């Protein structure tokens, strides 16, 4: 039975109701933000991009869907539609999609159906493939945001190959008014099967890439943790030990990840410290250190919230901007690190402070962003290369500047000679660090030099192939 004109008029009015549409869009934005946070906060690169559907489904699309569905379900009506709004989550590999789905099931603010990836897999005779879920606000969310009651949002999760096939064939398989030619359906199905096989084969490639990335990630994580730990005054760790009777020393790697009980003690200390001494750069780096070592999105979110609060209370302060930049860098938030690093340089110039330290740090953030395959403008890379080179000439006896210049040359240098020049700077920086006889200086240069030397050798080996 086709949909009646009265039904169309009733729901067309409903879809034009600002309150109803606003509720749907608010919930869609809420779901989008959760997945976008996962994309940004996770260094596992599980999500390539998250895309919200730009508009609420039109009355024309709704009517077409109801008429199609009623061929099998005569009672299907507007109330049955669960995809008036939606988001698309695109992942590089099938295994990434599975990890995203598993983590989605653990979300507290919303519930999804179906409850397994197998039930959620959608296929078509023409070869479409993708996982489709419907999200609804959880009872806990409705308690604090009651206006979301009744809202639903479709979540489509796909691999990049599935999305490419869908984008290429969308007008034929979805919007086509007439039945699709049998030969065309067969061709589409064969292409889809071939791409599905490629998806499966890509898992081997992912495993190889992951192995290399995990090695670099481990070196980077050690360097970042050491940087944060050694840049925090010992006082906050003394306060923490007294408050929690727990030791988070850098050398005690086995204590992480912390148990739920210990994590609650840590967060209790953070709240207590904030009440007594307010948010300062030591607390920011302490929270960042814990978030980095704990490796959970929840702790990263807390750390990011505190970082934003710290900036609000310290506007245009170059030291604050630099501390936040280092914090963001440690959590692999390179775009924010570069942004705040540049702000530190700008603010230091404004108040007549020495900018070399801030420039040096910003150059490092840029090079590491490139190493992590993040999008960095060419002029920014060129500026970092030239700036770090100049700083190493201006501070020839400071291992910090020589080490950064070495790293920048190794990552950004276009020639083998640049890499070799970087290796020489590494040796010079190491000798200078040793000559200081300072324990903390030696610790931090050991981990950074080791990381940089490994990267240099890897690049030289690649150039020789």
Image (spheres, rainbow, N blue to C red):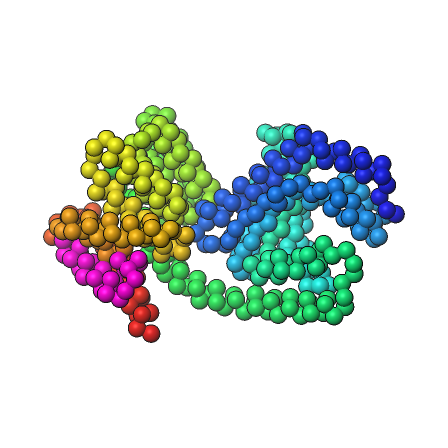
List x then y, in percent, for residue 1: 88, 47
Check residue 411 for magenta coloring: yes
- Taking the view exactly as shown, the residue that stands out farthest to the top is 276
List x then y, in percent, for residue 346: 28, 37
Instruction: Tell me the quarter of the picture where residue 290 sits.
Output: top left
List x then y, in percent, for residue 179: 79, 61
Q: Which residues are magenta?
A: 409-432
- In this rendering, position of residue 275 left or right of residue 429: right
Q: Nearer the viewer, residue 345 or 196?
A: 345
Check residue 428 for magenta coloring: yes
- In this rendering, position of residue 3 left or right of residue 275: right
Q: Is residue 294 above or below residue 452?
A: above
Q: Nearer the viewer, residue 342 or 153?
A: 342
| Image label count | 0
Residue drawn where x is 61% and y is 66% of the image: 196
Instruction: Tell me the quarter of the picture where residue 423 sits.
Output: bottom left
- Taking the view exactly as shown, the residue that stands out farthest to the front is 379
Residue drawn where x is 86% and y is 41% of the image: 4
Instruction: Tell me the quarter of the picture where residue 282 sits.
Output: top left
- In this rendering, position of residue 103 left or right of residue 363: right
Q: Nearer the viewer, residue 355 or 106?
A: 355
Residue drawn where x is 27% and y is 45% of the image: 361
Residue drawn where x is 60% and y is 53% of the image: 157
List x then y, in percent, for residue 139: 63, 35
């Amino acid at each position: 039975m086709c949909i009646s004109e009265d039904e169309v008029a009733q729901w067309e009015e409903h879809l034009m109701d600002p309150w109803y549409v606003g509720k749907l869009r608010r919930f869609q934005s809420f779901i989008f933000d959760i997945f976008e946070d996962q994309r940004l906060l996770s260094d596992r690169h599980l999500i390539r991009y998250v895309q919200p559907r730009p508009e609420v489904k039109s009355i024309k699309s709704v009517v077409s869907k109801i008429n199609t569905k009623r061929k099998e379900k005569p009672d299907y009506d507007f109330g049955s539609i669960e995809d008036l709004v939606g988001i698309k989550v695109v992942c590089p590999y099938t295994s990434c999609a599975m990890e995203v789905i598993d983590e989605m099931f653990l979300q507290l603010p919303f519930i999804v159906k179906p409850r397994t990836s197998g039930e959620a897999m959608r296929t078509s005779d023409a070869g479409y493939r993708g996982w489709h879920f419907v999200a609804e606000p959880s009872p806990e969310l409705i308690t604090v945001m009651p206006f979301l009651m009744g809202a639903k949002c479709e979540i489509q999760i796909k691999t990049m190959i599935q999305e490419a096939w869908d984008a290429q064939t969308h007008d034929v398989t979805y919007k086509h008014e007439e039945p699709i030619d049998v030969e065309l359906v067969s061709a589409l199905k064969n292409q889809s099967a071939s791409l599905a096989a490629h998806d499966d084969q890509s898992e081997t490639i992912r495993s190889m890439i992951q192995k290399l990335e995990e090695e670099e990630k481990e070196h980077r994580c050690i360097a970042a943790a050491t940087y944060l730990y050694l840049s925090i005054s010992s006082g906050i760790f003394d306060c923490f030990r007294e408050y929690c009777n727990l030791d988070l020393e850098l050398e005690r790697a086995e204590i992480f990840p912390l148990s739920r009980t210990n994590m609650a003690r840590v967060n209790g200390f953070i709240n207590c410290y904030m009440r007594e001494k307010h948010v300062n750069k030591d607390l920011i780096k302490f929270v960042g250190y814990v978030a980095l070592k704990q490796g959970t999105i929840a702790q990263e979110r807390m750390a990011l919230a505190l970082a934003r609060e710290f900036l609000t209370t310290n506007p245009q302060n170059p030291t604050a901007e630099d501390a936040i930049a280092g914090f963001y860098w440690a959590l692999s938030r390179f775009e924010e690190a570069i942004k705040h690093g540049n702000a530190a340089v700008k603010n230091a110039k404004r108040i007549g402070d020495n900018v070399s330290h801030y420039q040096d740090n910003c150059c490092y953030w840029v090079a590491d962003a490139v190493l992590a395959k993040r999008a960095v403008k060419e002029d920014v890379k060129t500026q970092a290369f030239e700036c770090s080179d100049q700083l190493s000439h201006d501070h020839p006896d400071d291992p910090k500047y020589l080490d950064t210049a070495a790293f920048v040359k190794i990552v950004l240098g276009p020639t083998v000679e640049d890499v070799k020049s970087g290796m020489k700077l590494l040796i010079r920086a190491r000798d200078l660090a040793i000559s200081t006889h300072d324990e903390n200086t030696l610790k931090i240069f050991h981990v950074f030099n080791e990381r940089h030397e490994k990267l240099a050798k890897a690049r030289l080996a690649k150039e020789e192939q």
